[in-house]
Image: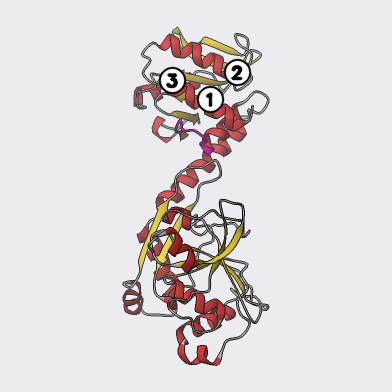
Amino acid sequence: MTAIEKWNQLAELHTRHFNDGELSVLQGAWERAFETYLGYEYHNEVRRQYRLPICTSNFPVDIAILNGDVPLYFVELKCHNKERNNQMVQQLLDYLTNSRGRTSTGILICKRLYVYNFVYGRDDDEQDYVEIEFKQNSATGIKFVELFSKGSFSETSVKRFIKFTRNVERIRQSLTSDFITGLLREYFASRYCSDEFDEAINDFNVVIESQGEFTAPPSQSIMINQSITNATNSDTRNPMLRCSSNLSDNVMPTNIEELTRCVFFIEGKRGLFAKGILHRDSEGFTVLKGSKIASSVSESFSQNCQRTLELRNRMKTEGKISNDYELLVDIPFPRLLAASEFVRGAPTSKDDYKWKTKIKRSNGVVEKLSLKQVLGESNIMV
């Protein structure tokens, strides 16, 4: 069983017992879980009601995971529909305080799972911890399984995990639209006055959106929508822009969501072979990294498409277009027409965008259809 499968089983266990008020039922379920999914021997290494000398009485820990007689970490169980509170945290930290340095790692399981690294001398609210939601395929949950399994556990690794996860969360919380705008202001401050920047930024809509947690490390998307002259700001990590470069066969799309999964391509003179995808929420289009654009431009392009010509020249100077005219970054455009003119180096008719995709018919025949043909057959409005 993989770490992903093990974590998903733990998340399912938590859901199954979400409304159980009987702690004895939870106790038995989690004892077996530490055996089944984390590999510890029931009774010998998974010890229930482990007793520590707190003050003058023996106060039992719900579950202690042992290596011989030495505790590796403690587990405190609470009803799974209860939010964490100070009393729960205090109880777990008391265990760690009175373990007399034998372990500094504690787990609190309530509505979420909390991993604590106890440091003597710190106040309770200063202790480092990480919060993990019981969600299927949680990246932090999978890491929890890997770190706390038998043979893998070490307090040093847990400390690194907590520090890394908390720092990532701090960075996420800092990534706001105001923060990004502030960075842009700072970047341009050496070349332009603040009034000029304020006038320029007013034409932008800067939005940063969390994409949530995945089995892979989470990513953020930054979308900046502007005219063709400002279309050089792309972020190849943006999930909206990620797309396979393979020209795989597509079935005829039936809605805009399916249409945005199709990779369109354009080929022509002067080495042109480019790939791109439609944007989901606009008529925009992104030309994908690795595309080859036309190595020269037509005379009519130089005369009638000055802004697009300036963009090509600027991106070449900035090193975003290689010497053999391959794009080294994804480039989003606010209009499909602008994307077509950029890669072709030639003016493009409003109704003839030149982009095609491979469509596999129900009889197995694969056809190259233009975007205009796809839109006509599917009745999708963009």
Which one is in front, 154 or 184?
184
Residue type at mark 2: give it: Thr
**The stretch drawn in magenta includes residue 321:** no
Find numbered disc 2 in the image and state the secondary structure of the residue it sits on. Answer: helix
Residue type at mark 1: give it: Gln
For the point 41% across and 12% down, the residue is 23
The Cα–Cα distance between marks 2 and 1, rounded to whole angstroms, is 10 Å
Look at the image and give the residue range highlighted in magenta.
Answer: 132-139
Residue type at mark 3: give it: Arg
Find numbered disc 1 in the image and state the secondary structure of the residue it sits on. Answer: helix
The Cα–Cα distance between marks 3 and 2, rounded to whole angstroms, is 17 Å
Closer to the observer: label 2 or label 1?
A: 1
* Numbered circle sitting on residue 9: 1
Q: Do callouts 2 and 1 mark residues in contact (Cβ within 8 Å)? A: yes
Q: Do callouts 1 and 3 mark residues in contact (Cβ within 8 Å)? A: no
- Quadrant of residue 91 in the image? top left
Residue 53 visible in the current orientation: no
**The stretch drawn in magenta includes residue 136:** yes
The residue indicated by pointer 3 is 16
* Numbered circle sitting on residue 36: 2
Q: For label 2, count other residues whose C-alpha is less than 10 Å away and answer few (under 14), some (14-19) or many (20+).
A: some
Which one is in front, 8 or 157?
8
